[in-house]
Amino acid sequence: MVSRNTTAKAGRVAGKANDSKNVGSGNQNDKDLLLSFYEEMVFIRHFELKASEMYQKARIGGYCHLNLGEEATVVGMMRATQTQDYLFTTYREHGYAIGKGSDPNRVMAELFGKADGVSRGWGGSMHLFDSETHLMGGYGIVGGQIPPATGAALAISYKNDPSPDSPIVVCIMGDGTTNIGAFHESLNIAAVWKLPIVYVIVNNFLGMGTSVDMASGEPELYKRGASYRIDGIRINGEDPLEVYDTCLKTFKAAREEHRPFLIEAMSHRLKGHSVVDPAKYRSAEEVKVAEQHDPIPLLEKKLTELGHLKAHDIALIAAKAKERVKEAADFAEQSPNPDIGQLFSNVYSKKPANDFCRLPGEPLFDEHSFDTVTER
Amino acid sequence: MTIKTYRQTLHDTLAEEMRKDPDILLIGEEIGHFEGSYKITAGLLAEFGPKRVKDTPIAEEGFTGAAIGAAMLGLKPVVEIMTINFSLVAMDQIINHAAKIHAMFGGQANVPLVIRTPGGGGQQLGASHSQNIEVFYAHIPGLKVVCPSNPADAKGLLKAAIHDTDPVLFLENLGLYGTKGEVPDEDYVLEIGKANIAKSGTDITVISYSKATTVALEVANELAHEQISVEVIDLRSLRPLDRKTVVESVRKTSRAVVIEDDWLTYGIGAEIAATIQEGAFDYLDAPVRRVAAAEVPVPYSKPLELASLPDAVTLSKVIHQVLDATAFNR
């Protein structure tokens, strides 16, 4: 059961379309839509670059996986969701959290492990959660999100009939995830129970360093739904408009028909698996290919050719993004650490009898543990 | 009070709760059309329909995880995993997810989920189908683990588990399904996290849970004829663990034996013994003894299987050894 988070600010960064059901399918001439995609992609790029910088300055701990190169998929897909839709995603989810409406300040604060973080400092980079925006978690275990996402869709179908207003679940995963058992078990369950869920595979061609071809008997991953008669589609994840259009259409079908779908979005990872990964398993040529597929210059070129963007605008948008990201980092820096006195307060949602709340080294019992002390 | 089997009590309690709360649904393999591997859910599909009694594919990780997600959105799923042995393929979802979601996401979501599953040896089912692996789950903060030893407790703890807002493993036992006992007719709810003094006594404390409690009570009743007064503590809940009730009893009796159906090494009894030495060290007249399963994969052959499992004769012998070592005078 999700409790409402009253402190989070809703709203999307650089986004105009807060609710996609009011927006028609985009087209090449929709200048405002394309520009807003561009602005949000640039913002997420700078957010991730700042996260990388802060990680290297040891302001962020643990693991830190970035959406660098994935921004078109992030923005196109999140714009196609409605606020009421539930999002279950991976540990590479900063951009998705922001795209779904989380306050970037609170996302950055979570990376810093601070009390104002979206997960109150309990989750970190891999475990962002925001009840206000229906971000139902980034999940650090590969594929761990897939069964719960499927069950969330069961809860939707339990309470809602198929309709244009039905919420759906969007469940994001990486290419490597399609090899785990939970992927296949969940797709099968979603098919037999006719659940309103769209599984999205972000295929960046690499697990950590193991390629899709090395790991997958069927490397065209969208075909893997066929075993369960789930319609699958492969799209160009570098094109935010293609992602947006496909997602909008697919999400609509999931709402109105209550059945699962599978989308495979092809994109490239510009850097290593995580901030600390130098990616030595990639040749210079492979890195060059990834850079050629960087969605931001691609969109920049397209918008420039269409006459929607001038060099001056590009610089302005970048400056604005950097400024906003700096504000998020400052907010995170100034946010207090979580209170150690609250260490045990989230183990259970209600304190049980004989709850065990001892810090390391503390004795099991103290002088108050027993009503009567019988001397021997 | 009505005399009922443990099996019938589970069935009736599920039906009673489902009638009261439309958000409760049952999820598991063969629970509907087949009416349950152990017939706990017999007739429930007919009464509640396929929306609330959901037969699943054979996919423990998938459907257990799905129940977690459904619970995050406010449903109250009661999952049946056919035996605890099969829960091992769902452990990622139970331990990495159900147990973590409330804390890891800063208290924003909770998982009001019940997982019912039977364990236990003694049924000649061989090594992979006869395990008592409750300690795997009892080790994990964020989970609650209850293990009723009789029909009345089965009712009281199942209701408590269903009403609970956090994930509860409700551990049944194949050897208990056919056992009978008095069950309160009223809306009987026990508090999770509290042990029960199943029989009061003054000479020695026997700590047990689940089916081992029936053995402990049998031995306690026999030893009463020898003027030995045994106090039997039924833990009822393995997490949270009611350490206080255990220690208070041992402070009174000065002697303690644990009987457990799991393996001894790192088992439930190890935690109980450590608790007693810390809470009642100065009160103990003898070391705490543990009667647990032999450390072998449980065999199929009946004589071998019986030799590997704790029983009343063994418990009685160990109790006598402890009493003799402390020069107990009847």
Image (cartoon, coloured by chain):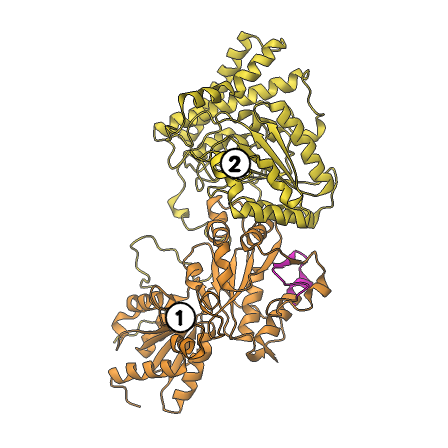
Chain colours: A yellow, B orange
Give whichever of A79, A334 is nearer the camera: A79
Is residue B106 in the magenta section?
Answer: no
Q: Which residue is depicted at the point 29% across and 82% down?
A: B321
Q: Residues within 10 Å of mark 2 (few under 14, many from 20)?
A: many
Q: Where is residue B291 drawn, in percent x and y?
A: 35, 75
Chain name for mark 1: B
**Closer mark to the observer between disc 1 and disc 2:** 2
Give whichever of B223, B301 is nearer the camera: B301
Q: Which residue is mark 2?
A: A175
Give whichever of A237, B190 is nearer the camera: A237
Chain name for mark 2: A
Q: Where is residue B68 drawn, in percent x and y?
A: 56, 51
Give whichever of A360, B143 is nearer the camera: B143
Same chain letter for marks 1 and 2: no
Quadrant of the rendering where the C terminus of chain A is positioned: bottom left
Q: Is residue B92 above or below residue A268?
A: below
Q: Which residues are magenta?
A: B16-34
Residue type, numbered disc 2: Asp
